Image (cartoon, coloured by chain):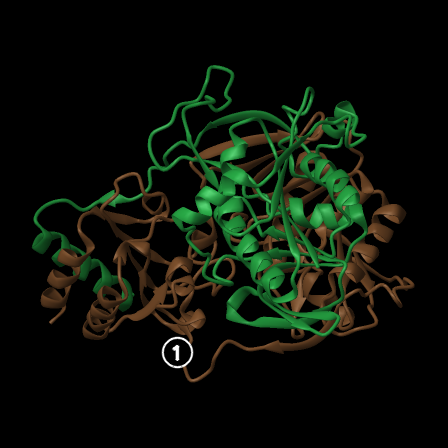
């Protein structure tokens, strides 16, 4: 299981990966080894030593920033040494830069955006969404010694980190990774500052494609002001240039878990849901009764979002 | 600068659809269209090519219906197209299998740059491009949200979670997978659509590409054992009634949740 860190911090998906790995281990998939690969890998060793983890491998890299080719070389070397049945990583932007190449070059089994895994007599059987999650595909990996799986963030239960761990063995592995980088890191740019941090909001009004036009988006921003909500958006609104990237919720945007997530005109594509599914109360308004957002919402209304928005302004006043 | 742009024709399931008895999709029922991500990778390729007097070659793996998607690319500025198909390739839908087919095309074309969409709208593996780079041993960057030429290098941005971006430099020959929103894909003019009819669409089979279909299929990363409709979760409790009543109930739920 490959833990992911950025800017010296372990990313939350890593705790989900450990949870998934431990559950598989209980189904008979074998012991769990967490690999920490990066310049500051050692600093995370204690954080990943949770109940169910047997080994922690610390693999230092020459450069501080993630580099896809270095990562591919390092993981390939670990697979060669440890011959794991499964390699789990997050379905994240970093993983997408190396895992498919790793699998193609190593002849490994591979599936991405995996939402469920079971360990059976013939190894792993996984589920993943297809056609915007309208369908579920079930996949297996006959004849593969090693299967690389990228797990959808938010789809797996977190590892139990509250119980004291009996203590995993920690091993430092020195690999010759000099000269493996094939891109040159220039800089990491933060999202535009001065704007609000939607991840800190208690009450989010999330707006999607259903708002229709930039003018109507402005109108709904005024409604958000009136009801005390922070505006977040789905990907298409950022791509259309109507909203700042810092407002985007989803896999390639922010992950939020507010007390209330009020979704207007959001269809509920997997990329979006990955960024909001842990919200404590999700209420969705959409004119399409088939919208996937109703699957993750606690409450839903099939209605014209503008009519509801106007009424909300009144009922909040 | 020769740029190769692998594209996919995807099934759009916006409306109703049915599954065949064997669990597969019923061919002929979905509407087929050019993958949304590929509209952006193609536009990026055409813009780079226009600035450097290059050539844009689009390639797709699939049966005759795929020609429509390739013609759409030609109308949006691609110079020529290759459709790969033939006996034994029908099952080559897995990203690793597709990558091995595309690798044969790339070896024959030897482009300076390969631009892929970051993912397809239907299967959404987000894997074919980077698998292709791996097979060709090309440097690559995945999920790119900006590309700029910088002498012999490209300066690109990689879109990270949380709205941050990484800026990095990469030297061609290389492969990039492109995120939507990187540019504004042009809509083809009628004249361009007419001209696209005159542009060549070559058809290449496994033999021309020295591909062994059995090997391509055996290279698949997984085997699909079932495809079914996702059971609707119990999901949302529906709020019904007049808009004012629905809004009043939402207000109540919001206030209760915030007070908790």
The residue shown at (78%, 59%) is A69
Q: Name chain A's colour.
A: brown
Of residue A176 and residue A131, the one placed in the foreground of this image is: A131
- State the image coordinates of residue B26 (x, y, percent, origin top left): 46, 21
Residue B123 in sight from this viewpoint: no
Label 1 marks which chain's residue?
A: A
Residue B126 in sight from this viewpoint: yes
Q: SS for tag 1?
A: loop
The answer to whether A79 appears left or right of B47 in the picture is right
**Looking at the image, is A84 positioned above or below residue B205?**
below
For the residue carrying disc 1, how many other residues have a C-alpha within 10 Å: few (<14), some (14-19), or many (20+)?
some
Of residue A214 and residue B204, the one placed in the foreground of this image is: B204
Residue assigned mark 1: A196
Which residue is situated farthest in the bottom direction here?
A194
Which residue is situated farthest in the top direction here?
B21
- State the image coordinates of residue A291 (x, y, percent, origin top left): 32, 43
């Amino acid at each position: 299981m490959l833990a992911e860190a950025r800017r010296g911090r372990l990313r939350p998906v890593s705790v989900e990966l450990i949870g998934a790995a431990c559950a598989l281990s209980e189904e008979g998939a074998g012991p769990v080894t967490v690999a920490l690969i990066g310049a500051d890998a050692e600093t995370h060793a204690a954080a990943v030593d949770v109940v169910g983890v047997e080994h922690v491998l610390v693999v230092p890299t020459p450069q501080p920033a993630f580099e896809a080719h270095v990562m591919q070389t390092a993981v390939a070397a670990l697979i060669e040494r440890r011959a794991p049945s499964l390699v789990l990583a997050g379905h994240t932007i970093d993983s997408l830069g190396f895992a498919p190449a790793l699998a193609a070059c190593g002849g490994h089994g591979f599936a991405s955006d995996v939402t469920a895994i079971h360990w059976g007599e013939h190894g792993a059987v996984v589920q993943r969404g297809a056609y915007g999650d309208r369908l579920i595909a079930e996949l297996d990996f006959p004849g593969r010694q090693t299967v690389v799986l990228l797990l959808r963030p938010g789809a797996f239960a977190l590892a139990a980190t509250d119980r004291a761990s009996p203590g995993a063995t920690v091993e430092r592995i020195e690999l010759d990774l000099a000269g493996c980088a094939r891109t040159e890191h220039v800089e990491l740019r933060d999202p535009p500052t001065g704007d609000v941090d939607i991840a800190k909001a208690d009450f989010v009004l999330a707006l999607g494609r259903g708002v229709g036009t930039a003018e109507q988006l402005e109108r709904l921003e005024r409604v958000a002001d009136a009801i005390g909500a922070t505006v977040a958006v789905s990907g298409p609104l950022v791509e259309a240039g109507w909203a700042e990237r810092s407002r985007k919720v989803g896999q390639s945007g922010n992950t939020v878990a507010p007390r209330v997530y009020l979704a207007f005109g959001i269809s509920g594509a997997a990329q979006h849901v990955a960024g909001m599914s842990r919200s404590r109360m999700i209420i969705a308004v959409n004119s399409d009764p088939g919208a996937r957002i109703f699957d993750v919402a606690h409450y839903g209304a099939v209605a014209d979002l503008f009519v509801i928005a106007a009424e909300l302004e009144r009922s909040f006043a | 600068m020769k740029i190769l742009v692998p594209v996919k024709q995807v099934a759009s399931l916006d409306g109703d659809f049915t599954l065949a008895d064997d669990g597969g999709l019923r061919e002929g029922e979905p509407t087929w269209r050019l993958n949304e991500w590929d509209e952006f990778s193609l536009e990026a390729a055409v813009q780079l090519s226009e600035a450097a007097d290059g050539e844009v070659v689009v390639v797709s793996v699939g049966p005759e219906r795929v020609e429509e998607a390739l013609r759409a690319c030609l109308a949006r500025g691609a110079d020529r197209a290759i459709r790969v198909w033939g006996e034994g390739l029908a099952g080559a839908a897995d990203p690793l299998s597709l990558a091995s087919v595309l690798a044969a095309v790339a070896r024959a074309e030897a482009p300076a740059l390969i631009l892929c969409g970051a993912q397809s709208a239907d299967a959404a593996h987000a894997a074919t491009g980077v698998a292709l780079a791996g097979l060709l041993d090309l440097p690559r960057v995945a999920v790119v949200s900006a590309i700029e030429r910088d002498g012999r290098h490209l300066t690109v941005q990689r879109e990270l979670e949380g709205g941050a971006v990484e800026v990095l430099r990469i030297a061609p020959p290389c492969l990039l997978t492109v995120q939507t929103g990187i540019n504004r894909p042009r809509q083809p003019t009628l004249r361009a659509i007419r001209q696209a009819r005159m542009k060549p669409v070559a058809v290449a089979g496994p033999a021309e590409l020295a591909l062994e279909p059995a090997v391509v299929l055996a290279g698949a990363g997984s085997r699909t054992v079932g495809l079914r409709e996702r059971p609707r979760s119990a999901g949302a409790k529906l709020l019904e009634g007049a808009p004012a009543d629905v809004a009043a109930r939402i207000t109540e739920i919001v206030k209760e949740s915030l007070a908790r």
